[in-house]
Amino acid sequence: MKDGFNREIRYIRISLTELCNFRCRYCMPEEGICKKRHEDMMTEEEMLSAVKVATRLGINKIRLTGGEPLVKKNIVDIVSKIREIDGVDEICLTTNGSYLSKYAKDLKVAGLDRINISLDTLDKDKFRYMTRIGNLDDTLEGIEAALKENFKKVKINTVLIGGFNDDEIVDIASLTFKQNTDVRFIELMPMYDGGDFGKEAFVPYSIVIDKIKEAYKGKYDDDKIIEKVSGDNNSVAKLYKINGAKACIGLISPVSNHFCAECNRIRLTADGKLKPCLHSSCEISIKGLSEAEMVEKFREAILSKPEKHDVLSYKSRSKAKRNMNEIGG
């Protein structure tokens, strides 16, 4: 189905839970979340009904998010049931990776196609600081476990944070030499207004190119150090490849150079709200509805998708009115 600006909506990101075993500073408060009543959250049956409705309207890519989706004890069963739904071409998952050593093999068998793993630093102390309670070794073991299972694609997501990990850009990018894993650098979005990040934290994606060119200067001709490559037309990432690397660098710029014109997605929160745009306050509830009623709400959500989100900056925060863990990463 097309939205009001002729964009074909083919992709839905579904948050399975607001809960997480980390407390990342750009995602949620230190004390965690105010736990909602079980009856206020989407049931598994409602979520599966939503997937069936989405496929009827032409959506064929499903991404499971959280919070942390792997804290769901029935996550493997959920993937398996989604795999059985007609019209689902691709099932993806975004995770902090800490439980992947336990679940990677079963997820592959269940039908999961792709995994994105969050990794903002390679320094153990900085990792603990940013996640507040996470262990870097768990995530690194999870990445290894995912690679071993030979998913269609394993990607690493790194949120760019000035003053925190901008000095690690080259080290993180160098993972593309060691394994066939794309590394995507994502601009920090002004979502959670907890005072953890000052203006200097919001750095543009172009800093990645600058740092890589500086690090490899003299090894190759300047125009051969890192080159733009073509990729998936539905991807929001600008793809580059460092000379000699096995995989690509992806640059995602929701702040400095938004990609709204190419956005082909809607979102479904764990409490059953359709969000036409990440940065909009517009939410349309489908909880408690029949599939027939859901169809109309999905149409409403798709047609409510704005042409673009408002300007984002340190001073101009997202209008989402939720933290990222409450929306779906």
Image (cartoon, rainbow, N blue to C red):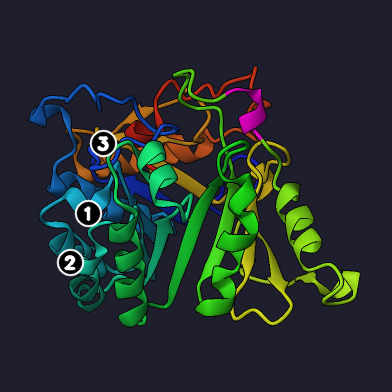
Compare marks 1 and 3 and give the one earlier in the sequence. Answer: 3
Q: Are marks 1 and 2 in contact (CB under 8 Å)?
A: yes
Front position among marks 1 and 2? 2
What separation in Å lies between label 1 and label 3 (alpha carbons)?
11 Å
Residue holding disc 2: 102
Identity, as a three-letter code, of the amino acid under mark 1: Leu
Secondary structure under the numbered disc 3 in the rendered image: loop
Using the image as rendered, state which of residue 25 and residue 121 is in the foreground: 121
Q: Is residue 59 above or below residue 276?
A: below
For the record, the magenta segment spans: 198-202
What kind of secondary structure does the magenta stretch mostly adopt? helix
Image position, residue 327 (x, y; %)? 37, 35
Q: Residue at x 73, y 41 (%)?
A: 257
Identity, as a three-letter code, of the amino acid under mark 3: Glu
Magenta span has 285?
no
Residue holding disc 1: 70
Q: Is residue 296 left or right of residue 244?
A: left
Image position, residue 132 (x, y; %)? 32, 36
Residue holding disc 3: 18
